[in-house]
Image: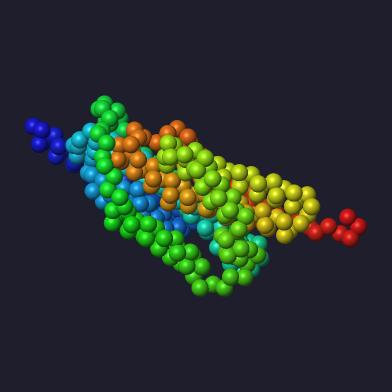
C-alpha cells in the first residue's frame, strides 16, 4: 500500500508538471507574448540561477531538494534545508531579474541608436528580465511553502559541521562570473559603444561603488561576528537604498538647474549602485545565509533579510522606471537670459 501511494504521488506530480509545460509551450507558440521575448535575459536568468544555487548549496543538497519537491520522503534535516533551498531559489530569481534589468538598461544607454525611440525601445525590453525573475520566483515558492509546512512539524535539525568551501560552490562562483561576462558580451553583440552613457561610465561609477561596497563592509564590521551573514544582507540593502535616494535627489536638482550632465551623472549613480547592491545580495550575502541555515547555525533567514530580498529589487525596478522617464523626458537648455 505504501509503495502504491508513493507511485501515485509521483505520477500526479509528473502530470502536473507536464500540463504546466504544455500550457507554457502553447502560449509561446501562439505568439501572444511575442513582444515579451528576451532570449539573452532568459538565458542569463536560468544559468545565473543555477550558479547562484551552487554558490549557496552543495550538489547533494540541491539534488535532495528536487527529490523532496517531487514527493520523496526525507529526514528532519533534509526537510528544512530543502525548504530553504527553494526559498533561496525564489530569492535568487527575483534579485537576478532586477539585476538583469539594470544590466540591460546600462547596455541600452551605451549603445548608439537612431533617436530617442530606439533607446526607449531597448530600455523597455530591459524590464522584461524582471518579469522573468518574478515568474520563476513564484514557481520556486510553491515547493518552498509545501516543504516549509512539513518542516514545521518536526524539531530543529542537529548542527552540521562546515566543510569549508567545497568544489561545487567554487564552480558556482566561477559559473556566476562567466554568466555575467557572457551576458554583457552577448547583449552588446559587437555593436560600437557610442550612446549617451557609455557602459564603463555607468557600471564603474566610483562614488556609487564606494558607497555600496565600502558602506556594506563598514556596517558588517560594526555589527560584529554575532550578526553573521545577516549583517551583509542588511548592509547591501541599506547602502543600496541610500544610493538610490541620493541619485534621485541629484537628478531632481539637475532638472531644477536644467543641467543635462548632472542628470546623466545621477542616472549613472542609480544604475551602478543598484547593480552592485543586488550583486552583493545574490553573490555574497545570500550564499552566506544559505550556509548558515544548511549547517544548522540558524533556523532560517531573519525577517529583515526577507524584507531586504523582496523590497530592494522592487525598489530597483521602480527607480529604473524613474530613470527611464528622466532619459526620455525632453528638456530645453536655459536661454542666455535665464
Q: Taking 114 as reference, is 58 above or below it? A: above
Tell me which residue sits at (67%, 53%) in the image.
266
Where's residue 103, x and y in %? Answer: 52, 58
Residue 198 relative to residue 39: left or right: right
Task: Identify which residue, 27 or 242, lies in the foreground.
Answer: 242
Where's residue 124, x and y in %? Answer: 56, 55
- Any part of residue 66 in sight: no
**Quadrant in the picture for the C terminus:** bottom right
Residue 162 relative to residue 49: left or right: left
Colour convention: rainbow
**Quadrant in the picture for the N terminus:** top left
Tell me which residue sits at (70%, 49%) in the image.
250
Tell me the quarter of the picture where residue 75 sits. Answer: top left
Where's residue 332, x and y in %? Answer: 79, 58
Q: Residue furthest left?
A: 1
Tell me which residue sits at (55%, 63%) in the image.
107
- Any part of residue 4 in sight: yes
| Number of marks drawn | 0
Residue 201 relative to residue 25: left or right: right
Residue 250 relative to residue 280: left or right: right
Where's residue 131, x and y in %? Answer: 47, 48
Tell me which residue sits at (10%, 36%) in the image.
4
Amino acid at each position: 500500500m505504501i509503495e502504491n501511494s508513493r507511485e501515485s504521488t509521483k505520477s500526479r506530480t509528473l502530470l502536473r508538471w507536464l500540463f504546466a509545460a504544455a500550457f507554457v509551450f502553447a502560449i509561446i507558440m501562439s505568439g501572444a507574448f511575442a513582444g515579451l521575448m528576451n532570449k539573452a535575459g532568459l538565458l542569463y536568468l536560468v544559468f545565473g540561477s543555477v550558479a547562484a544555487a551552487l554558490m549557496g548549496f552543495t550538489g547533494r543538497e540541491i539534488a535532495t531538494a528536487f527529490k523532496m519537491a517531487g514527493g520523496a520522503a526525507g529526514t528532519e534535516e533534509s526537510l528544512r534545508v530543502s525548504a530553504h533551498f527553494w526559498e533561496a531559489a525564489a530569492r535568487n530569481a527575483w534579485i537576478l531579474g532586477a539585476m538583469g534589468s539594470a544590466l540591460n538598461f546600462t547596455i541600452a544607454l551605451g549603445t548608439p541608436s537612431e533617436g530617442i525611440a530606439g533607446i526607449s525601445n531597448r530600455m523597455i525590453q530591459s524590464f522584461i528580465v524582471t518579469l522573468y525573475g518574478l515568474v520563476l520566483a513564484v514557481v520556486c515558492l510553491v515547493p518552498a511553502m509545501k516543504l516549509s509546512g512539513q518542516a514545521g512539524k518536526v524539531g530543529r535539525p542537529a548542527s552540521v559541521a562546515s566543510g569549508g568551501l567545497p568544489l561545487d560552490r567554487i564552480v558556482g562562483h566561477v559559473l556566476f562570473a562567466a554568466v555575467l561576462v557572457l551576458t554583457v558580451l552577448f547583449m552588446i553583440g559587437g555593436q560600437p559603444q557610442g550612446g549617451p552613457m557609455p557602459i564603463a561610465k555607468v557600471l564603474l561609477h566610483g562614488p556609487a561603488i564606494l558607497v555600496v561596497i565600502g558602506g556594506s563592509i563598514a556596517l558588517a564590521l560594526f555589527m560584529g561576528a554575532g550578526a553573521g551573514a545577516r549583517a551583509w544582507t542588511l548592509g547591501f540593502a541599506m547602502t543600496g537604498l541610500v544610493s538610490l535616494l541620493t541619485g534621485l535627489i541629484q537628478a531632481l536638482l539637475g532638472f531644477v538647474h536644467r543641467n543635462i550632465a548632472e542628470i546623466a551623472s545621477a542616472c549613472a549613480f542609480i544604475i551602478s549602485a543598484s547593480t552592485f547592491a543586488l550583486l552583493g545580495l545574490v553573490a555574497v550575502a545570500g550564499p552566506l545565509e544559505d550556509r548558515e541555515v544548511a549547517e544548522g547555525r540558524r533556523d532560517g533567514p531573519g525577517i529583515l533579510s526577507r524584507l531586504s530580498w523582496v523590497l530592494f529589487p522592487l525598489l530597483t525596478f521602480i527607480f529604473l522606471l524613474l530613470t527611464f522617464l528622466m532619459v526620455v523626458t525632453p528638456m530645453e537648455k536655459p536661454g542666455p537670459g535665464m
